[in-house]
Image (cartoon, rainbow, N blue to C red):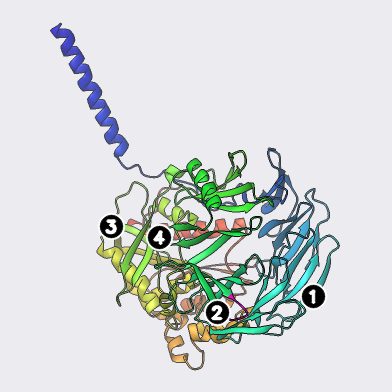
Amino acid sequence: MKHSLSLALVTMLILMICACSNRQKKAEPQTAEPVAMEDFFKDPDKGQFRISPNGEMIIYMAPYKGRKNVFVQKLGDTIATPITEETERSVYNCFWESDDRIVYAKDKGGDENIHILSVKPDGTGLTDHTPFEGVRSGVLDILEDKPDEMLILNNKRNPQIFDVYHLDTKNDKMTMVAENPGNITGWITDHDGKIRAAITTDGVNTSLLFRETEKAPFKTVLTTNFKETLQPYLFTFDNKNLYCASNLGRDKTALVEFDPREGKELRVIYENPKVDISGLDYSRKRKTLTVINYQTDKPQKFFLDDEAKAIDEKIQAKIPGYTFLVTRKNKNEDKLLVYAYSDRYFGGYYFYDVNTDQFEKLADFMPQLKEDNMAEMKPIAYRSRDGLTIHGYLTIPKGVEAKNLPTVINPHGGPWYRDSWGFNPEVQFLANRGYAVLQMNFRGSTGYGREFWESSFKQWGRSMQDDISDGVQWLIDQGIADPQRIAIYGGSYGGYATLAGITLTPELYACAVDYVGVANMFTFMNTIPPYWEPYRKMFYEMVGDPQQDSLMLAEVSPVFHADNIQCPLLIAQGANDPRVNKDESDQMVEALRARGIPVEYIMKENEGHGFYNQENQFEFYGAMEQFFDKHLKNKGELSTEM
């Protein structure tokens, strides 16, 4: 008996020890498995799902013939058919114009001169509706109640401005319905597809125009400085007033109902004391607003409609822990497409049937990127040297202690944009390679109110750059970053911030990667796209006037301070970039090579503002990986191949 009891006790102790050991083993952080570079940047298996108005078919984009093309599939089937065969450059976007016609957009070589094309679901009837050279087109209103008709914009008549055309996609007939007098920068249609409002600018001041009917002349309702926002989202459902994003008389942008006849706000529908609103959704069928979107550290929703809230809660219960949006609905609004994601899940599309509560996954964007192998993206905040709170995100390699790490500083483009919480392939790629990554919403980043935005005016290379430098110092003070192994990488404005960082504060960085970044503030101003011309005066006030502010712009133009650079640099540029001209990168490379400073230069003849073609992306990120591996790892040793 005693023997049996002792054996039982020993057995229990062994089981407890094993259980404790298992718990300890489970709690131990596991480092990430290496992932091939191509797996982070390959075109998604499927993406950009859209549902037909009748709710019977879907379209999506997927790789085909080496580019992203459009596929069509009957809902519930497993077989899809490609209906486009673009081989030179991937399709940008696609949507249903009606049950019988699909519209998609593309450009040539990254020049951003967008063409509008359409095709039938069976792949026949392919038509380029805007086959004009050097012309940029866009869709204003798909006119949901008028199959085979839509309103489009293009600058064929004048490269600096956009007129409105009625397009019959079935007969390929285009007729001008609104001629731009020269100062209109935005057109607004009512729920019947009538052009009833417009936005004008003189470069600094913005006006809202309104008319009761399309036969009546436009009248100026309200004129504001560009620093004030009155952005119409849509007409009220009786087509009388406007729902607008407004910061008139307030710091944070709120949703208001605005009377265009009296030129005044009637009521505030929603405002958040901490951040601007970022968008809204509505039910066209039930004629009601449903939800307001805004972002704090993570995306948030404020519901105005109980029915929409109930549907949202049902969907959330099916995918707990994930952030999601209802991205598309059929005309009856009972069949929904849902996009779900997280910081470690690249994202996927789901189908939800409101009537039956059926919920099924349609596709993962990147099934090869396993969620439990990705790193967590944590919201952080720090104080700038002049007392501002700078919000951002810190990603630490999975299973690695946040101490003395090689680090990549990653300022966003724009600069009037913001980084958001969610899956970022670049960040995850760098974290998978062992680098901590800091993204920061420096002053001027959008979403934090008017005062925070205005504090960036004429501060390129100055306090905006200080905010980035202060983030670097914060990482060092926290013991997270190894001061000797910090790199900076960014694209567009982030590319400028990269060049400014290594010329104005060269002591901070061990190496740098500039992706389509501005090098010379003067040549940059002289080569902006023609359709940005109406904003030139505003741009001068926000960034600097090449004549009146010439000394300041010279002080913050990296090309004039190339001799300050102390670290290796990699530059990537598209030859057809209409925003940041190729000459920006050429100047920087020439200035560095003239001084004997090593610089790697990747320039692609078939790209624009950022690389879009798959093979070019692979070349760029492969070069970046080797570059950081060489200059950021301990003692310059190469890491294990992945």
* Amino acid type, label 2: Lys
Q: Give me the residue at 20% from left, 14% from top.
A: 8
When the figure is inspected, residue 503 is found, relative to residue 320, above or below; the finding is below
| Residue under numbered circle 2 | 264
| Residue under numbered circle 4 | 297
* Secondary structure type for disc 4: loop
Sequence-first tag of 2 and 3: 2
Q: Is residue 147 magenta?
A: no
- Separation of residues labelled 4 and 3 (CA atoms): 25 Å
- Crowding at mark 1 (Cα within 10 Å: few <14, some 14-19, many 20+): few
Q: Is residue 238 left or right of residue 410?
A: right
Q: Residue furthest bottom?
A: 548
* Secondary structure type for disc 1: strand
| Residue under numbered circle 3 | 404
When the figure is inspected, residue 591 is found, relative to residue 603, above or below; the finding is below
Whole-percent x, y for residue 467 in the image: 36, 73
* Amino acid type, label 4: Asp
Sequence-first tag of 2 and 4: 2
